Amino acid sequence: MAKKDNLSPDAALAVGTSHSGFIVERVEAVREIGGQAYVMRHEATGARLMWLSNDDANKSFSIAFKTPPADDTGVFHILEHSVLCGSDDYPVKEPFVNLLKTSMQTFLNALTFPDKTMYPVASTNTADLENLMGVYLDAVLHPAIYNRPRIFEQEGWHLEVEGEGAEARLSYNGVVFNEMKGALSDPDDVLYQSLSSALFPDTAYGFESGGNPRAIPGLTYEKFLETHARHYDLANSYTVLYGGVDIERELAFIDARFTEACRRDAGAPNPLALQAPVAPERRVIRMATAESNAEVGVSYVIGTAADRARVLAVDVLLDALTGSNESPLKRAVMDAGLADDFEATLIDGVLQPQAMFTLKGVRPGRAGEFRALLEGECRRLAEDGIPREKLEAALAQAEFNLREGDWGGYPDGVALSMTAMSSWLYDDERPLDYVHYEEALAEVKGMLDGGFERLLRELVCESRHSAEVELVPVEDGDAADEQAELEDKRAQMSDADLAAVAAEVAALRAEQEAPDSPEALAKLPQLHVADIEDPTPEPDAPMVEAPLPCIAHELDTHGIAYVYHYFDLRRCTAGELPYIGLLSDLLGKLDTRDHSASDLDTLIETNLGGLDFFVETYAPNDDLAAAVPTFVVGASALSDKVERLADIPREVWGSTDFSDLDDIRDILTQRKVALEQYFVSSGHAAGILRANTYFSAAAKASGLMGGVDFYLFLRELLANWDERKDALSAKLAELCERVFTADEITVSFIGAAADRDRYWAAAGDLGLPKAGKKAAHVLDVHASGTRNEGFSIPSNVSYVTRATAPSAADAGTVGCWHVATRAITYDYLWNEVRVKGGAYGTGFRRGSAGEHSFWSFRDPAIDATLKRYDGCAAWLVGWDGSEDELAGYIVSTVAAHDAPAKPRALARRQDIARFNQKKPGWRDKVRAEELAVTTDDIRALAAALADKEPATGVCVFGGDDALAASSLDLDVTPLC
């Protein structure tokens, strides 16, 4: 069949034509995606729809609603969760979870933004995409919230009572309530929202769209329903289709659901107005957090979203001024000694974007100096000129990022749907301003001769719309206020009132625990194992002849080349691994023999898409006692600059100067601050790594280079800086000589063969010497052994991990465990830990060596969660999944296995498999195991979970009060 020409418009979709109730209003070429945009309007409802047409097989659908908040109750966030808890056509408790269990989705989620709520899905399978579309459309248009009020209690908030009589105590619970308690434990989030409140006192952006836990209990069920009725109206909606869809088929599919949508006529949605310029007095807010989290923020409104080029120019400007420690504005602020770190952030995707400047780890008594310093330096740069080479480098980096189109974990269609909303939400005539970038990029390039200085002057020095907020750490904050509020409520309640609270909680639990009826489950769309298509064969990645060992990934990278250099670290001792972690933080940020740190930063941004130094550890043959820590140097560049992939990394690893100890201290202090914030925001990930160190030598090595062990080493180093700094400089230089040699390096090149040849012609042996005796392996690293640990962080929620060593009773295959993991996570744990326990997230993983772990995310409990983990084995042995349910788990597991990967991600996956010594065809073997799983196979895995012989450890990240209240005898270490 001939390939469709997406670069030419489809004559059948000409402006003015009608297709299943949709009128085409606009057709526009979008060369940035290699296709066309067709903008339409649904005649009967006024719904907007756009198809971004190209030949991408990973197709997507998104429906969004304009949802600007009018208060801090988080009603739109709670609605985002709640509409996915059943609907008219799909009257089950958790259709969203059923889709996670059973579909071939490559993306499935819902997202609350400051002014909109989006429901995007993606799949490579047309029938599956339509299943997802059908469930999502019924969810947003006909949700069960109108006849099941306890959905609001579960996802939003409810009261609970513990104890009896005079000992009775009240507490709040709810998924969004607990999620936001975790989110607002992050000083960055609190500062941002406080700045937005100051900048936008009269509009939606002054409110916390996710919800402030102090305000969430003020939301009533009646207001919740009324808000849905006004905003989830098709006239207030924006639908985006993407990829190689059959457009006539999908328009007919959507039209049928739009036409039957309930018209509630509940009134107009909340307005989204422009805020007139304001310049409020400096504000001081107080937050219960560590003293090191003192911050000051100053924000300036850029203009409006309608000025696409101006927003892009500010992004380039902020990178040129603050993108590294050597950027001119950041260098001036850091040299003033006010704080540990300084950064600038573009806040876009809103009607009035802003540039936010943040000082972190503010020194006592210095916060008041920040704004004058900031604006004085900006005035100087505007008058004297911003270094042209910095602007050119930032422009080159911006252009690379736009052309690469790497959206992280988001499929292209989902990311582009979000991007389109950056202008379409505010102007029906501008659906593509941010999908396009070529014209804006050309305009910004024309600003090099004075344009950026004018922009800086307008943005900062002449701003009429700005605000400043200082965040001051204190011991007691919202948690104390919440407790006082609950005690006041309790004092006003009779025994009958308390009994009513307990009765309502019991009714909620009964509803949560009641199984969906077979009739309701039968209404869900169901794919079967027969619907699974044969996978696309993975391309070979052979070793090829080159001056150094080289893996060749000849993939279509659209004119971009990637190279990874893997250096074996077994020539280092376990005690040296933390220094390796420091090395990965410092390389690329210090002077080299040929360039100052500032000039090096410019050189990298001008010529490379990225230059990254990081560490990872492999465990060959899934051996828990094995550890191969590896230093990785990764770089990317456009094809015409491929030679720079050789000489720039070589200069950095071969000639970095470690004598500037002040710069080194600044960089390491910034790393310490980043780790402390990581523990608060992602304690589940930190907990999983830490728990794995109990059994795995590879995890232990990783922890020494980047986990809790590394953090404790770094904290102690900085606390004793004067005594240790000189030895540190010598140690880092010596490690570079020992690590960066030709003895045990593997180079992985991703891109065209011609580019690879040009790379090697420039690289030669990369200037790497032979190490000789220094290449001998001396590493001796072992798992740390099981323990029960608590790590104290400034947070109102906890992250609870429990890990267990391999069991002799475990006879399951890797593929069988993959299928069972989805059942455990999306059935047992979802219902027990998330729905009933109130945690925002939870999961299970079984490592390929047989170790397994449970984890929770933003969890209000510790002991209750651990007890729920204990119940998993009994649940699994009695699991009575139907034939269709098992088929769904198999389908979703295999689909995840087969999910498309971008070239760089595919190549990295193959490299890691090679270093872990996976046998050829191992992925095919695992896939076959997944397809062959039976119900009895899954039940049999319960023996491994029930086995009491293997060692088990617990790792909890949480606040002091929560750790102290746990009945476990936790060995507690304060982190921050």
Image: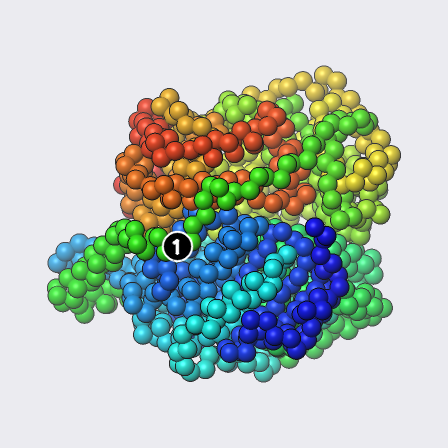
Displayed quadrant of residue 295: bottom right
| 936 left or right of 194 in image | left
Name the residue nearer the viewer: 716 or 258: 258
Instruction: Provide residue 193's location: percent of width, then percent of height.
Output: 50, 67
- Residue 724 x %, y %: 61, 36
Assign a secondary structure to mark 1: loop
Give the residue drawn at x 30%, y 51%.
518
State the residue lying farthest toward the front: 1
Of 663 and 912, nearer the camera is: 912
Mark 1 Cα within 10 Å, few/some/many (few <14, many 20+)? some
Residue bearing the label numbered 1: 524
Which is more toward the observer, 830 or 805? 830
Image-quadrant location for residue 231: bottom left
Task: State whether residue 188 is above or below residue 752.
Answer: below
Residue at 74 percent of width and 33 percent of height: 552
The answer to whether residue 370 of the structure is visible from this angle is no
* Count of all numbered marks drawn on residues in the image: 1
